[in-house]
Image: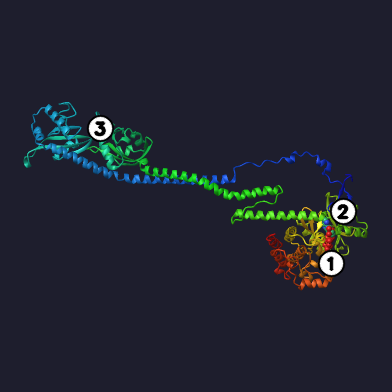
């Protein structure tokens, strides 16, 4: 590591010190300036393109549209589900009425047919025909056909008084004649009781049809003379027309399902009559799958509800057994209601709602996009503002203040912009101050005198085997401050060598200093000078801390008098932040004054010497207080009382007073008088010295200067909040 590089202390102000050249060992890893310039710039210039996405407004309006559409579909889905439920329940209820309706229909139908046959049986011609025992088979057959036609029956029968078949219209003359029907229930009753009868019969062999048959006795004579000559019967078909009639009555679809299987075999069904929608429906499968065959055809019980679908339509049905005269189940009546038909009205309404929904959705699109734009516009404005700030442009349009979260964001943004502007103003102002030629820093003034005063420790000498002293930064009441290169850490530090008399070994001051330094070391904050270590070398106590390339606030005030509002406020706020950090580490600064506030060229302000000054005063009387500090001292400190955070706020108040008016609130050549003034005299309103000062600022300064600490702002953050309210 050679001493080839010369680094100039550029932060010392004035022409004669800017060239205080000090040979410094080059910092490892730092390439020479010439090399830096020739570094390839590709990597720096390439900025990653931001990811492209859907605009916020579009996303918002789309979200609203999707939400609306989902709400609508959800509502429709729920309504459909409910409608299905309700319809199902209603159909079930209605189907419960089917048995009663059917039995009344069947009864009236049967009684009408019996009456019809009875009146034909009572006709003299009929009586005469059956009284004529010797009438030929041809005659009976012709008469049976005439009767069938007249009665509108499918077939007519004549039986003799013993129940033997004389003729039937649907067979050839003489065929089956003499066959005994006396055991058949509907023939037996007229024979034995001389009353009419009726029953369902199923033609399994020929027509595969269901009939309602009615029979009536044909008699001769009256009273005691009454004589049975035979029986007249007619069979009426249960056909599609009857099914339709029943369908109207029951407001449903009807199917007569006959069991064509031989007696004793498992049921084999076929639709023998039905309303149009149920014709050709495979009931065998439906009844089998719903396990309805056994209850209906085996046990002769009604069955329902059973659900099935045919030709894309859903039905709910109930089935009733139809029994023959002997009580055997020969068929089933299926009464079905179409769910779709019942839901038709609802579906129409649903279609209407869907159309209206679609219309609302279309109409809502422009409305929601306008709404979304209203929400997103300020955000876009803020985003554009942020971009502009990134580009160094601070005069940006901000959205109007609103009461919502965007408003909060806008206000925070405006505060941030104001802050940045103040910072920029401060930077500019510091740069201007530093540019003025011909000035010599206080520090450098001290250099000449002090350097000669303390031989053995000086520029270009190695101190404590570790610190290579580069220059003298200044001298204060506690000792001298050097800029040094820490060889161990290979970085620049500020080295404060404390006066031996005050911080001698074993003194109480040394103890307090150790304690305070232990706490101070913990503080890492941009507005606080970092304290590194407390050390000792050849009987001298020294303190190492962050080297701050800048100038003290006191120098700035000496040069320019009172500060402009924007840079002043910026410095004041940073002082507050630094103080808040110091206080939160349970450290009381105890010596806040412009000489202990460093201002860097980039506008960053740093507090120094917190806690350290207190160490120097332990065990001393008021005389021991540094001359430069009395002007900033709180009344409680003047009294020798215990200090707390609010004592620092008093000193901050004096500092702010000086910054904004160019004068301290209390001035006197005599230390005692000054202390008394702090204790008892009310400060002049700063506006008497600078009328344009904002009220909020004046109130904040005067609040800090309250004699009683309870009347001061409670914390440094409170003071900062007050300063943030100052509008300039
Ligand atoms: N960490 C530092 N970085 C850069 N310069 C510093 C640092 N600390 C002190 N200085 C410089 O050294 C000078 C002397 O500081 P010092 O704290 O010893 O005295 P003071 O603050 O001027 O007076 P007092 O003793 O009353 O606090 C300061 O004015 C400042 O210019
Ligand atoms: Mg100091």
Q: Disc 2 and disc 1: Cα gap in Å?
A: 30 Å
Question: 362 or 606: which is nearer to us?
Answer: 362
Q: Are marks 2 and 3 in contact (CB under 8 Å)?
A: no
Going from the N terminus, do you reach mark 1 or mark 3 first? 3
Please tell me whether residue 512 is drawn above or below residue 290 in the rendered image: below
Quadrant of image for the N terminus: top right
**For residue 638, which quarter of the picture?**
bottom right
Which secondary structure, mark 3?
strand
Q: Which mark is residue 627?
A: 1
Please tell me whether residue 535 is drawn above or below residue 1 in the rendered image: below
Q: Which residue is mark 3?
A: 209
Q: Disc 1 and disc 3: Cα gap in Å?
A: 131 Å
Q: Position of residue 334 (x, y in %)?
A: 30, 39
Q: Position of residue 35 (x, y in %)?
A: 82, 40
- Mark 1 against mark 3, which lies toward the viewer? 1
Q: Which mark is residue 15?
A: 2
**For residue 711, which quarter of the picture?**
bottom right
Number of other residues with Cα within 10 Å of mark 3, as a class: few under 14, some 14 to 19, many 20 or more: many
Going from the N terminus, do you reach mark 2 or mark 1 first? 2
Which secondary structure, mark 2?
helix
Q: Disc 2 and disc 3: Cα gap in Å?
A: 129 Å
Q: Is mark 2 within 8 Å of ligand 1?
A: no
- Mark 2 against mark 1, which lies toward the viewer? 2
Residue farthest to the front, as pictured: 691
Quadrant of image for the C terminus: bottom right
Q: Is residue 72 left or right of residue 679?
A: left
Going from the N terminus, do you reach mark 2 or mark 3 first? 2
Question: 529 or 686: which is nearer to us?
Answer: 686
Q: Is residue 223 left or right of residue 254?
A: left
């Amino acid at each position: 590591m050679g001493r080839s590089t010369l680094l100039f202390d550029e932060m010392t102000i004035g022409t004669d010190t800017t060239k205080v050249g000090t040979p410094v060992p080059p910092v490892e890893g730092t390439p020479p300036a010439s090399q830096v310039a020739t570094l390839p710039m590709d990597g720096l210039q390439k900025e990653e393109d931001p990811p492209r996405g859907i605009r916020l407004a579009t996303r918002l309006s789309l979200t609203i549209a999707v939400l609306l559409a989902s709400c609508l579909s959800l509502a429709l889905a729920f309504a459909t589900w409910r409608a299905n439920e309700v319809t199902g329940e209603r159909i079930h209820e209605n189907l419960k009425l089917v048995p009663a309706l059917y039995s009344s229909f069947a009864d009236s139908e049967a009684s009408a047919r019996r009456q019809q046959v009875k009146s034909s049986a009572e006709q003299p011609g009929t009586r005469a025909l059956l009284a004529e025992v010797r009438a030929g088979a041809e005659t009976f057959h012709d008469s049976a056909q005439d009767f069938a036609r007249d009665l509108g029956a499918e077939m007519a029968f004549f039986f003799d008084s013993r129940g033997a078949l004389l003729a039937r219209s649907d067979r050839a003359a003489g065929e089956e004649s003499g066959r005994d029907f006396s055991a058949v229930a509907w023939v037996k009753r007229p024979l034995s009781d001389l009353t009419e009868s009726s029953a369902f019969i199923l033609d399994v062999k020929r027509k595969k049809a269901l009939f309602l048959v009615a029979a009536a006795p044909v008699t001769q004579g009256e009273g005691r003379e009454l004589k049975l000559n035979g029986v007249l019967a007619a069979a009426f078909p249960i056909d599609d027309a009857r099914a339709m009639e029943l369908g109207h009555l029951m407001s449903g679809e009807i199917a007569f399902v006959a069991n064509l299987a031989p007696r004793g075999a498992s049921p084999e069904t076929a639709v023998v009559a039905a309303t149009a929608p149920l014709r050709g429906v495979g009931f065998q499968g439906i009844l089998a799958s719903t396990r309805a065959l056994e209850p209906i055809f085996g046990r002769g019980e009604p069955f329902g509800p059973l659900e099935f679908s045919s030709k894309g339509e859903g039905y709910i049905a109930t089935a009733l057994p139809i029994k023959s005269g002997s009580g055997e189940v020969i068929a089933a009546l299926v009464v079905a209601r179409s769910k779709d038909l019942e839901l038709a009205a609802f579906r129409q309404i649903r279609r209407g709602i869907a159309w209206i929904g679609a219309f609302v959705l279309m109409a809502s699109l422009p409305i929601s996009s306008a709404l979304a734009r209203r929400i997103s516009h300020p955000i876009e404005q803020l985003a554009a503002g942020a971009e502009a700030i990134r580009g160094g442009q601070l005069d940006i349009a901000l959205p109007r203040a609103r009461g919502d979260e965007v408003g909060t964001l806008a206000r925070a943004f405006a505060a941030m912009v104001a802050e940045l502007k103040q910072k920029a103003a401060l930077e500019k102002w510091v740069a201007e101050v530093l540019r003025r030629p011909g000035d010599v820093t206080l520090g450098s003034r001290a250099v000449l005198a002090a350097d000669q005063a303390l031989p053995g420790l000086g520029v270009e000498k190695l101190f404590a085997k570790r610190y290579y002293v580069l220059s003298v930064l200044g001298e204060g009441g506690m000792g001298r401050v050097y800029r040094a290169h820490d060889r161990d850490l290979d970085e620049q530090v500020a080295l404060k060598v404390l006066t031996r008399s005050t911080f001698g070994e074993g003194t109480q001051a040394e103890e307090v200093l150790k304690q305070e330094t232990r706490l101070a070391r913990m503080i890492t904050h941009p507005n606080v000078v970092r304290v590194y270590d407390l050390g000792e070398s050849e009987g001298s106590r020294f303190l190492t801390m962050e080297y701050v390339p800048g100038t003290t606030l006191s120098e700035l005030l000496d040069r320019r008098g009172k500060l402009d509002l924007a840079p002043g406020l910026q410095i004041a706020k940073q002082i507050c932040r630094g103080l808040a950090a110091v206080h939160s580490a349970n450290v009381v600064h105890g010596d806040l004054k412009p000489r202990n506030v460093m201002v860097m060229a980039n506008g960053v302000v740093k507090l120094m010497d917190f806690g350290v000054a207190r160490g120097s005063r332990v065990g001393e009387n008021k005389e021991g207080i540094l001359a430069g500090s009395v002007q900033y001292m709180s009344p409680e400190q003047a009294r020798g009382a215990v200090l707390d955070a609010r004592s620092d706020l008093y000193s901050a108040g004096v500092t702010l007073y000086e910054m904004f008016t160019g004068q301290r609130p209390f001035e006197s050549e005599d230390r005692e008088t000054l202390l008394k003034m702090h204790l008892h005299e009310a400060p002049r309103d700063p506006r008497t010295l600078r009328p344009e000062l904002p009220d909020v600022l004046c109130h904040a300064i005067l609040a800090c200067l309250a004699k009683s600490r309870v009347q001061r702002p409670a914390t440094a953050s409170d003071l900062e909040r007050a300063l943030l309210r100052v509008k300039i």
